[in-house]
Image (cartoon, coloured by chain):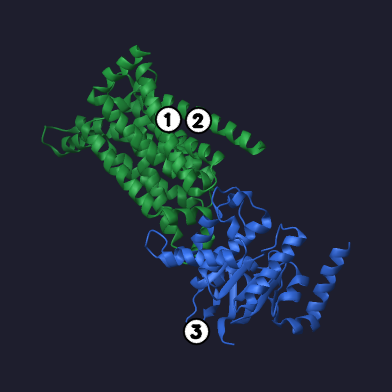
């Protein structure tokens, strides 16, 4: 397994104030990394840094093996603007190919082909002509996932993808992501749900309020003290 | 009915009316194309703010021209030349750059400044309006200040005074705007739908936002002649909102919005000629009527 991304001693923050320090982890091809942490622990800042939208304050996030941050397929959290957007599914999925176009104004045949195959993989072909805002939450996430697939063939970065979905749709989306991971696509997912993370992920990164608490394989995490206490507290929440 | 038709044919023989029609349709087309993006990006009020800035710039230019003429010693002096330049370009030479800068500043503030987007728009727009009105009142050479101001704000009949040079300028600008819009259509879509995703995949979203700001400013300056600076937002917002009620893909919304806008502008100009109503507000009223119809259609469709 070759390494794709190395995060070494990275410090993240806003306007000179560090939010998270001492981030050390690596992502290799085919990994399924779940990033856990409470709100405000700097997860979204980390995402921006990984995407190259924000620079680290010190340390580095490095891509290796000819891989670049532009090749990440990103699945952002939905904005209110999008929920009410008049666009067809095909238009949205195709926009994932845009970076490939460069300055060329229109999509080529290959790009349209790529878009069709992404929709096929996620089982949303028959939705192609439908309006995005009329789809269910689960279908909308699949559309955005298909768009991310258009942008990448190697790494997906998912920002809390199951938020707001009903349990059945959540499970379907998890299965679909696991399926893509089995085909060799690296998955990095920011998540709230520790139980699902432990069930699907190969690696776990746990960020505390200002520093990294854990990075390692999923098995190590489950047997670690931090993992167990976190799982217990989360489990307790669910039983209440 | 035939009486009205005769009247219409009679009026359309005047080059002045023909020019008004050409300019009106082009401006309506351009503003509706961009309107969809602005509405979806929650920038509807930027049109309004910029038009007030344009009004302020126009007042400043008029005052500058008056002052320069006063200061000029002879016909060939530099101040006179400047004043003439201002007059000949209909003050465009001042209005366009000022509005452009305001557009860029306003679209930038959306992201990370102390004063948040909507407050910045309100501040700049009302500020420019107030200063512009004061300047005109203090320095204007014209006897009918109230009439001039009203004309600029509501467009009254200024579309009927479009000169050949202005028409040519308008055609060039319109072709540019439409051309850029078609060439960058996919990019504009991506940046409108999801700026973060676009940026993450390496699309230069900031550059395209800037492009949108520049085109918006150009359209607003052009549209001042048609409907006046208070009513420009209507040209931008109504066709887009009507189209979004009924159509479900971005392309269809844009096309429908353009068609609505052009038809309303044509209808508005014709009606204003036949019944001597103010052109700008007639066009906007037509847009409102169409919006109401599309809204009803969407209600009926929704129930099925």
A172 shown above or below A229: above
Q: Residue furthest front?
A: A126
The chain coloured blue is: A
The reply to whether callout 2 and callout 1 are in contact (CB within 8 Å) is yes
Is B84 displayed left or right of A39 in the figure?
left
A215 shown above or below B80: below
Chain B in the picture: what colour?
green
Q: Residue furthest top?
A: B3
According to the picture, the residue beneath numbered tag 1 turns out to be: B264
Residue A14 visible in rendering:
no
Counting other residues with Cα less than 10 Å from the Cα at mark 2, is it few (<14), some (14-19), or many (20 or more)?
many
- The numbered mark at residue B290 is 2
The reply to whether callout 1 and callout 3 are in contact (CB within 8 Å) is no
Of the two numbered discs 3 and 2 in the rendering, the one whose residue sits closer to the viewer: 2
Looking at the rendered image, the quarter that the C terminus of chain A falls into is bottom right
- The numbered mark at residue B174 is none
Of A40 and A145, the residue lying toward us = A145
User: Do circles 3 and 2 both sit on a common chain?
Assistant: no
Residue B128 at x, y = what percent? 42, 36
Of the two numbered discs 1 and 3 in the rendering, the one whose residue sits closer to the viewer: 1
According to the picture, the residue beneath numbered tag 3 turns out to be: A65
Residue A70 at x, y = what percent? 49, 71
Q: Residue at x 35, y 34 (%)?
A: B25
Q: Residue at x 25, y 39 (%)?
A: B169
Counting other residues with Cα less than 10 Å from the Cα at mark 1, is it few (<14), some (14-19), or many (20 or more)?
many
Q: How far is disc 2 from disc 1 in space, using C-alphas?
A: 8 Å
Residue B289 at x, y = what percent? 51, 27
Q: Residue at x 23, y 26 (%)?
A: B15
Secondary element at tag 2: helix
């Amino acid at each position: 397994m070759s390494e794709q991304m190395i995060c070494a001693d990275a410090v993240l923050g806003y306007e000179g104030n560090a939010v998270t320090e001492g981030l050390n982890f690596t992502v290799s091809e085919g990994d399924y990394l779940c990033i856990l942490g409470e709100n405000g622990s700097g997860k979204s800042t980390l995402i921006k840094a990984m995407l190259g939208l924000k620079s680290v304050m010190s340390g580095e996030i490095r891509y290796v093996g000819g891989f670049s941050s532009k090749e990440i397929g990103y699945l952002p959290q939905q904005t209110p603007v999008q929920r009410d957007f008049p666009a067809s599914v095909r238009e949205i999925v195709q926009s994932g190919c845009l970076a490939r176009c460069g300055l060329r104004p229109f999509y080529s045949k290959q790009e349209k082909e790529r878009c069709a195959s992404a929709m096929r993989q996620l089982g949303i072909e028959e939705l192609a002509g439908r309006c995005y805002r009329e789809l269910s939450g689960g279908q909308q996430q699949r559309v955005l996932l298909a768009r991310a697939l258009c942008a990448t063939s190697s790494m997906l970065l998912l920002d809390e993808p199951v938020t707001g979905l009903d349990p059945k749709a959540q499970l379907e989306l998890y299965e679909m992501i696991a399926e893509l991971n089995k085909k060799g696509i690296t998955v990095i997912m920011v998540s709230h749900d520790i139980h699902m993370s432990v069930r699907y992920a190969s690696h776990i990164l746990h960020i505390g309020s200002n520093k990294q608490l854990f990075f390692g394989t999923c098995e190590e995490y489950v047997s670690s003290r931090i993992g167990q206490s976190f799982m217990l507290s989360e489990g307790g929440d669910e039983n209440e | 009915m035939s009486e009205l038709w005769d009247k219409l044919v009679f009026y359309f023989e005047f080059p002045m009316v023909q020019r008004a029609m050409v300019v009106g349709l082009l401006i309506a087309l351009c503003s509706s194309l961009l309107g969809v993006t602005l509405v979806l990006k929650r920038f509807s009020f930027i049109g309004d703010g910029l038009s007030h800035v344009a009004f302020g710039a126009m007042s400043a230019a008029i005052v500058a021209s008056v002052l320069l003429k006063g200061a000029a010693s002879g016909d060939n002096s530099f101040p006179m030349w400047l004043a003439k330049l201002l007059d000949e370009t209909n003050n465009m030479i001042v209005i366009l750059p000022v509005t452009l800068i305001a557009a860029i500043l306003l679209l930038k503030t959306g992201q990370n400044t102390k004063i948040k987007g909507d407050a910045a728009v309100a501040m700049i727009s009302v500020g420019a309006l107030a200063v512009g009105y004061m300047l005109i009142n203090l320095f204007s050479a014209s006897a009918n200040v109230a009439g001039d101001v009203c004309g600029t704000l509501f467009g009254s009949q200024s579309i009927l005074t479009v000169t050949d040079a202005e028409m040519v300028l308008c055609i060039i600008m319109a072709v540019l705007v439409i051309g850029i819009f078609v060439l960058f259509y996919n990019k504009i879509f991506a940046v409108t739908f999801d700026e973060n995703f676009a940026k993450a995949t390496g699309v230069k979203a900031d550059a395209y936002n800037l492009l949108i700001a520049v085109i918006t400013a150009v359209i607003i300056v052009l549209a001042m002649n048609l409907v006046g600076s208070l009513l420009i937002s209507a040209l931008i917002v109504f066709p887009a909102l009507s189209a979004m009620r009924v159509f479900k893909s971005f392309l269809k919304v844009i096309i429908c919005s353009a068609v609505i806008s052009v038809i309303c502008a044509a209808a508005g100009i014709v009606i204003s000629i036949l019944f001597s109503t103010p052109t700008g507000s007639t066009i906007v009223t037509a847009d409102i009527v169409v919006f109401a119809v599309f809204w009803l259609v969407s209600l009926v469709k929704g129930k099925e």
